[in-house]
Amino acid sequence: MEVPFLDLKKAYIELKSELDQLWHDINKDSFYVLGSRLEKFEKEFADYLGVKHVIGVADGLDALNLSIRALNIGSGDEVIVPSHTYIASWLAVSEAGAIPVPVEVDETTYLIDPSKIEQAITAKTKAIMVVHLYGLVCDMQPIKNIANKYKLKIIEDSAQAHGAFDLSSGIKAGALGDISGFSFYPGKNLGCFGDGGCISTNDDILAEKLILLRNYGSKKRYEHEVIGINSRLDELQAGILSIKLKYLDKWNKRRQELAKIYLDELKNVAELILPEYNDGHVWHVFAIRTSKRDDLKEFLASKGIATIIHYPKPIYLQDAYKYMEIKNGSFETTEKISSEILSLPIGPHLDKEDAKSVSQAIKEFFNKDQ
Ligand SMILES: *Cc1c(COP(=O)(O)O)cnc(C)c1O
């Protein structure tokens, strides 16, 4: 058996005729940066999310970093971040010159624990960055209440949550805070053919600023209003994303069907902790938990089943953040998650039969142990 973690080639094959036509058309115009294809995609994705503005940028890290800069958050300011996330969430804060202040995550959702946010707020706190990790939207109402009380901005890291929505309001990730960053890295639920990202917001002033920031601080050629950077989503990637956006809901639905298969097949395995199903979850990652994680990973690999650990080492224990002097043991839930979590293959092109075979192999692993 060979079950890859994610099969991107099948996505290309499904859309081959549209994508090949795009390549042909782009080379006919030979217009590659900041053109009509980007404008079209920005409008389409804004409509999809239910926001006023989408601004394409070079990648997800830039999307978050520029969002922070647009909010005038910088040197000496603090931004609350979850202790368990991909390092880019923290790096975006650091790159803006601000300080990421970690808050523990919830043991069942793996998302920032709203009840622990307030104690991390200081006079320097300017924003709360929520990360809709694995494709599940954070518990927004209590977070909004805190943000209102302390006059903090809410930045969403939606890099794993294209199409995910809040169950109570139906509002999509990317439309739940003041500003949001998305990544279109190839493996994300909506991915392009290389690096890409965007920012979404309902705020006209922030959108104006971001249009300057991403393009050398310039709206009019050779007029530079602010110190900007070069971070643009090129025409080819925008064209690819316009094509793929039409399939996002269908592909997310497929992920949900696969998640249901895993949850059903594995529900009686006593040694596993499984995620909870909900209709707003888009399953960028399907993560199970077990204290026998490393052995299980190895066993599955021996059967040709690829798994990944998201993420094996807490960010505050990485050398990059050693200067913060946050000790081992500081965030018990995060450390437990890091040592026990395992992501199973999932994606819009994974066969349902393969999800069953993966489940079978997991059951075999636990049965042989007894
Ligand atoms: C992928 C990802 C990012 C960064 O996106 P890039 O496009 O790789 O820069 C940020 N945050 C989270 C949670 C991610 O998964």
Image (cartoon, rainbow, N blue to C red):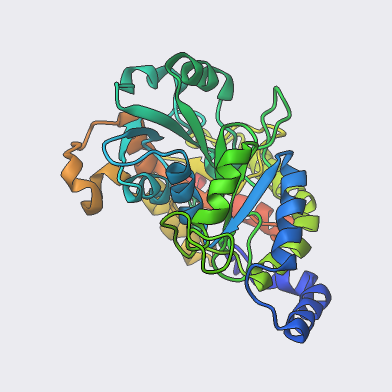
Q: How many marks?
A: 0
Location of residue 82 with respect to 248 vertically, above or below = above
- Residue toward you, 31 or 156: 31
Quadrant in the picture for the N terminus: bottom right
- Residue toward you, 329 or 88: 88
Where residue 48 sits, quadrant-wise, is: top right
Q: Which percent across, then down, holds residue 118? A: 38, 17
Residue at point 39% right, 35% down? Answer: 81
Residue at point 74% right, 66% down? Answer: 37
Q: On the picture, is 142 further left or further right than 75? A: right
Location of residue 197 with respect to 194 vertically, above or below = above
Q: On the picture, is 71 further left or further right than 319? A: right
Q: Which percent across, then down, holds residue 110? A: 47, 34
Residue at point 44% right, 54% down? Answer: 226
Q: On the picture, is 46 further left or further right than 130? A: right
**Residue 104 shows in the view:** no
Where residue 299 sits, quadrant-wise, is: bottom left
- Residue toward you, 172 or 112: 172
Q: Which percent across, then down, holds residue 74? A: 34, 41
Q: Which percent across, then down, holds residue 116? A: 38, 20
Residue at point 31% right, 45% down? Answer: 315
Q: Which residue of the protein is positioned furthest toward the front in this rendering?
A: 223
**Residue 196 shows in the view:** yes
Quadrant in the picture for the C terminus: top left
- Residue toward you, 148 or 110: 148
